[in-house]
Image (tube, rainbow, N blue to C red):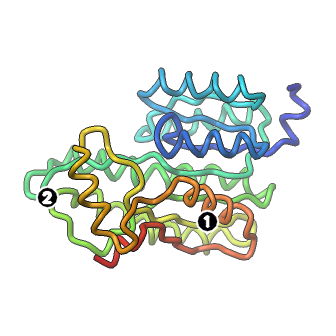
Amino acid sequence: MNMKSFTKKPFVLITGAAVRIGRAMVLDLSNKGYIVGIHYWQSQKAAVSLFDEVISKGGDAFLFQADLTKPDQIQTMFDEILAKKLNLTVVINSAAIMPEKHIDVSSVEEWDQIFNLNLRAIWLISKTARLILKNNNGCIINFSESGVNKTWLNHPVYLISKTALNKLSQILAKEFAPEVRVNTIALGLVLKSNDMEVEDWQRMVEKTPLGRSVDLEDLLHAVHFCINNCSMTGEIITLDCGYQLI
């Protein structure tokens, strides 16, 4: 692909894109004709493998390594996007951390780490991306948590950060309108974490009213809905098989 065609083909930047949900979105949006920006921090091997897979299937992709808790690295990432003359149309903020620790033993450093990635980074990415997106009638999609109204004692700081993200997303939607739309997808149980036992995961899934985890295809449909529905901004779409009801 030559540089001229880069300026015409839509480009999507996905943070935390190397594995799990991020990986699924990269492959899906590449199949839909987007140039995909694969952001990663420490998952270099997975990111390179995903990049190679996209290219082997005839897609176009770029790799962006950045520690999103560092504002200067966020700026450098967008400087690279501008230098490559990419037609940034969609930004998907999916990078997040969910450490397990009770609030009475959480340190200031741990609190800052969670908030700097789960909240501050999204604010910085969004306001930086807006300068480009506003010329393309673009959109931002943030990923939140369907359990924000619960009081999980084992993931309290994560839960607080996602509660704040919901409000941040709505404020950004109002501030960035009408040029840029901002919507949020609040997820329940989608993929089992690597450190969770299969039996424990299955017990959690079976408690949901629908008795299953969120299908990746349903998640991808929601992403497309957020991208393509030009009448929607400031919304929080919940995909959790009813998990919020238990």
Residue 125 image position (x, y, % from top left): 55, 49
**Left or right for 234, reference 137:** left
What amino acid type should be assigned to the residue bearing mark 2?
Answer: Ile
What amino acid type should be assigned to the residue bearing mark 1?
Answer: Val
Front in this rendered view, residue 193 or 124: 193
The quarter holding residue 208 reads bottom left
Residue drawn at the location 68% of the way across and 29% of the way down: 54
Q: Which residue is mark 1?
A: 182
Quarter the C terminus occupies: bottom left
Q: Which mark is residue 103?
A: 2
Tell me the element at label 2: helix
Residue 20 image position (x, y, % from top left): 46, 41
Residue drawn at the location 40% of the way across and 41% of the way down: 69
Image height of 15 relative to 154, above or below: above
**Left or right for 41, reference 207:** right
Residue drawn at the location 39% of the way across and 68% of the way down: 146
Pointer 1 local density, CA inside 10 Å: few below 14, some 14–19, many at least 20? many
The quarter holding residue 176 reads bottom right
Quarter the N terminus occupies: top right
**Left or right for 5, reference 57:** right
Tell me the element at label 1: strand
Q: CA distance from mark 2 to mark 1?
A: 30 Å
Residue 227 image position (x, y, % from top left): 70, 61
Earlier in the chain: of badge 2 and badge 1, it is 2
Residue 185 image position (x, y, % from top left): 51, 64
